[in-house]
Amino acid sequence: MSEDRLKHHREAIDAIDLEILELISRRAEHARKIGHIKNGAIYRPEREAQVLRRLREKNRGPLSGEAVAGLFVEIISACRALEEGLKVAYLGPEGTFSQQAAIKHFGHEAKSISCLSIDAIFRAVESGNSDYAVVPVENTTGGSIPITLDLLLKSPLKICGEVLLRVHQNLLGRSMEKIEKIYSHAQSLAQCREWLNRNLPDAARIEVSSNAEAARLASMDDTACAIAGETAAEVYKLDILAGNIEDEPDNTTRFLVLGKVDAAPSGCDKTSLVFSAKNRPGAVHDLLAPFADHKVSMTKFESRPAGTGLWEYAFFVDIEGHQKDKNVAKALEELAARTAFLKIFGSYPSAVS
């Protein structure tokens, strides 16, 4: 009797699989025709955000919204590749969280281009060697990544998307008994500081350009270990000596998607910008007033030395809404009249974790 029930369900699944295949093929044909009409503009971040948002809203289970979004990211990625696959630069080598974020956003069919530094990622897109870039900008534990902010100030690239990636740090190596040094990116070392203080207080902590580079170095030295993700353990054939060693269980890194064109409004957007203010009483209040007056909410406010004069600062701000939204546009217009320097990095769809 149980064998009959299994057969019934398996036959149903086989029939549904064929229906899914037919529907995916029909979807791919429409995507290819749209690509011809758009003359190669195969990635529109606002459109893809709207598609994934709608599917999450319509999902009735039992699959989670995240699982459904992941499936459709790959379908969209495969459909894009029918025309001309995207090239996406990320902080390498292979196996980094940056590569994981790029795959989460663009799918496996996009061609990943490994870069040795965040500077090189920017250059890859600016020079045309890559279509888009995925760069880390902040972490819930380690804070902002200064080099990314500094490069945004100088670069003509636009922010056209963001990715939120839950980061689980692992201690990778050959043996816990021989550890003399720990390689990792500065952000990962900061995210695991308390765990390292308790468990490996005497091991030297060595900052390197990426977690995958840390894993590569650890793979060549039995007295070394690395803090990195599971992908790096697989790539460099290291054991996971301790898993999920981050100090904060909700440890999340935010990545920015960079390109040469702006994203159109998607209906649920953010805008990132930077402006400067001199060190005088009331200066910052005056510059922030337009946001309050036009009911624009800020999700981030961070100051850094502007590099233009003594005690002058640049303020990096994220706000809710698209720069084409009426209230946002008015607030930005008034802000521009009050500051000597204003740069809008871009408006883009808000990410869903």
Image (cartoon, rainbow, N blue to C red):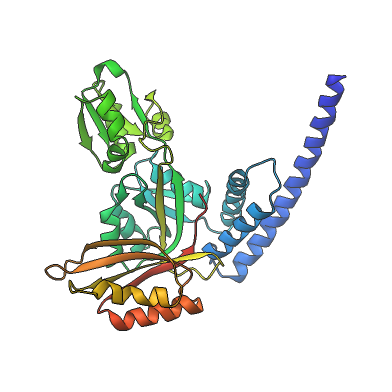
Q: Position of residue 55 (x, y in %)?
A: 65, 54
Comparing 93 with 258, the one in front is: 258
Residue 155 occupies which quadrant of the picture? bottom left
Comparing 173 with 348, the one in front is: 348
Q: Position of residue 332 (x, y in %)?
A: 39, 77
Relative to 40, is 81 above or below? Answer: above
Query: In the current view of this chain or complex, which residue is farthest to the top?
Result: 177
Would you say residue 246 is visible in this rendering? yes
Q: Is residue 253 left or right of residue 106?
A: left
Q: Position of residue 109 (x, y in %)?
A: 53, 48
Residue 190 occupies which quadrant of the picture? top left
Q: Residue at x 32, y 33 (%)?
A: 227
Query: In the current view of this chain or complex, which residue is farthest to the front?
Result: 281
Query: In the current view of this chain or complex, which residue is farthest to the left?
Result: 310
Q: How many marks?
A: 0
Q: Position of residue 173 (x, y in %)?
A: 32, 24
Query: In the current view of this chain or complex, which residue is farthest to the bottom?
Result: 337
Q: Residue at x 50, y 65 (%)?
A: 269
Comparing 208 with 220, the one in front is: 208
Q: Is residue 31 left or right of residue 302?
A: right
Q: Quadrant of the N terminus?
A: top right
Relative to 145, is 311 above or below? Answer: below
Q: Is residue 97 left or right of residue 51?
A: left
Would you say residue 44 is visible in this rendering? no
Residue 292 occupies which quadrant of the picture? bottom left
